Amino acid sequence: MPEFELTDQIIRASIEARRELGRSHAEVVYRNAMQAALEERGIRSAKEVPIRVHFHGREVGFFRGDLLVEDRVLVERNAGRPLEESHAAQLLAYLRASGIRVGLLIHIGDTVTLRRVVL
């Protein structure tokens, strides 16, 4: 499945989770609902995936990606404050560290707001 189709399915899963759950749940609830919706579509995903950061051949840190879909799209969700440029900058740093090309920022509030980030 091409990446644009994969990101479309991720977006649909996030909208489905928001529509059915409403807006007052914690981020982890939306993540789990999105993961269930993706699984129902036959799309594989993993949550809290450790991604290591290297410098001069040595590991200097790591972060946990919210959701890694088909090992090709990194999804960062936010159910708190609206998306800001700092969120996009953080996702871009995660993409560089992981070698993954495409990321999605998803904010679930009154509506679903998203931003696609491509390395």
Image (spheres, grey):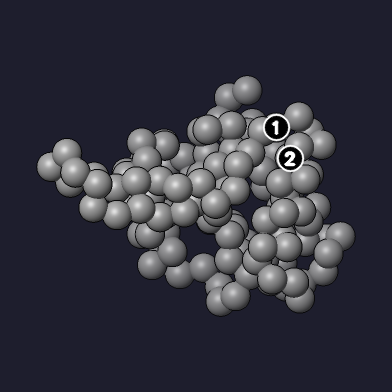
Q: Is residue 87 left or right of residue 54?
A: right
Image quarter in which the C terminus is found: top left
Marks 1 and 2 in Cβ contact (< 8 Å): yes
Image quarter in which the N terminus is found: top right
First in sequence: mark 1 vs mark 2: 2
Q: Residue at x 29, y 54 (%)?
A: 61
Amino acid residing under circle 1: Ile
Residue closest to the eye, 114 or 63: 63
Residue found farthest to the right: 20
Q: Secondary structure at mark 2?
A: helix
Circle on res. 43? 1
Q: Residues within 10 Å of mark 1 (few under 14, many from 20)?
A: some
Task: Find residue 86 and report its image quarter.
Answer: bottom left
Q: Residue at x 51, y 68 (%)?
A: 83
Circle on res. 61? none
The reply to whether residue 7 is visible in this rendering is no
The correct choice, above or below, for 7 with respect to 116 in the image is above
The reply to whether residue 21 is visible in this rendering is yes
Which residue is labeled 2 in the image? 38
Task: Find residue 109 and report its image quarter.
Answer: bottom right
Q: Secondary structure at mark 1?
A: loop
Q: Is residue 6 left or right of residue 53?
A: right
Amino acid residing under circle 2: Leu
- Residue 3 lies, in percent from the top left, at 55, 30
- Residue 23 lies, in percent from the top left, at 76, 72
Measured in 3D between alpha carbons, the distance from the residue under mark 1 to the one under mark 2, in whole angstroms, is 5 Å
Q: Residue at x 56, y 73 (%)?
A: 82
Q: Residue at x 23, y 52 (%)?
A: 60
- Residue 29 lies, in percent from the top left, at 73, 63
Q: Is residue 56 left or right of residue 115?
A: left
The correct choice, above or below, for 60 with respect to 46 in the image is below
